[in-house]
Image (cartoon, rainbow, N blue to C red):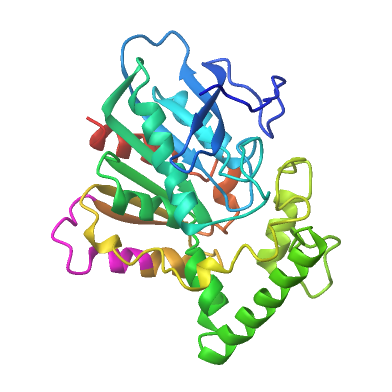
Amino acid sequence: MADSLNLGRDWDKTFPLSPAVEHSKAVFRNRFGIELAADVYVPKGASGRLPAIAVCGPFGAVKEQASGLYAQAMAERGFLTLAFDPSFTGESGGEPRYVASPDINTEDFQAAVDYLSVREDVEPERIGIIGICGWGGLALNAAAADTRIKATVASTMYDMSRVTALGYFDAEDSEQARREKREALSAQRTEDFRLGVYARAGGVVDPLPEDAPDFVRDYHAYYKTPRGYHRRSLNSNEGWNATSSLSFLNMPLLTYAGEIRSAVLMLHGEKAHSCYFSRDAYADLVRDNPYTDNKELLIIPDAVHTDLYDRKDIIPFGKIEQFFRKYLQ
């Protein structure tokens, strides 16, 4: 099947191209038939089959932002890497636009593994994944489903099903609160169908209100400034489709995380508002799981959520490299 995506060829990332890597574009399909756009990073001068890593996130970002930065950094360390746009976002295909799905987005990671597994320069038994923010939870879900994934890093993880169903810090954990969300989203579906246009939920708030919480200010400092802004990024612009969160209300992502046998490294900032997601997910990961020797939670002192998006002085790339070298053998 011929590729139909029109991919840009100019370097439009939020980070500079490293002289230590070769960069190219790629397109592959998931099993829903959606074409996914990706950037491939290969260590310059590499030969033979390499261990490979697929990277995605943050939730509402594009491959030109944090996932690309991670992918390039790991290619500098000797891995063939791929940063991709999820279905319905960025340069990837899929209609309607700006939709998230716990099923399809988990499949996106598995489709990236499909693609890497058949490349002649990849060792198919040495494939790992990195998920950032909401894609950290999706990465764990993919690792629970796909035994080809030999090692997983979840960085500054969100559990999108939990935050959707329970609210931040589980403050909306009641049937009534969920009922109100369902009523609002159901009414929005009718309105969208009537108008023939899908309303957008809005990206990161701009301008910042004076009483904005610190973590919202952190998001603004990344997504709304030259540091991390990208024209295709949902969070930098009008956000997700407003009804996108409907399915996350009813589909817990990490139900079988405790059955992951492969290696998992979870990274989170000590001062991140989201740190409870990783702490709790790690507890579930090792509870009643006989395969705990290859599981680790690393809490990074003083770091906030977005520090692990692009702060190369804070992101523990040395630790990530050590982890993948150990488990992608």
Quadrant location of residue 188? bottom right
Residue 300 in view in this figure: no
Q: In this view, does 212 lie above or below 175?
A: above
Q: What stretch is highlighted in magenta?
A: 281-294
Residue at the far left in the pictured view: 290
Q: Position of residue 142 (x, y in %)?
A: 36, 50
Quadrant location of residue 67? top right
**Which residue does the image show at 28% across and 27% down from the upper left?**
124
Q: Is residue 103 above or below residue 229?
A: below
In screen coordinates, is 85 left or right of 48? right
Q: Magenta stretch: residue 271 in it?
A: no
Q: In this view, does 250 lie above or below 72?
A: below
Q: Nearer the viewer, residue 235 or 5?
A: 5
Q: In which quarter of the image is the C terminus?
A: top left
Residue at the far front in the pictured view: 194
Q: Where is residue 24 in the image (x, y as percent from the top left)?
A: 56, 18
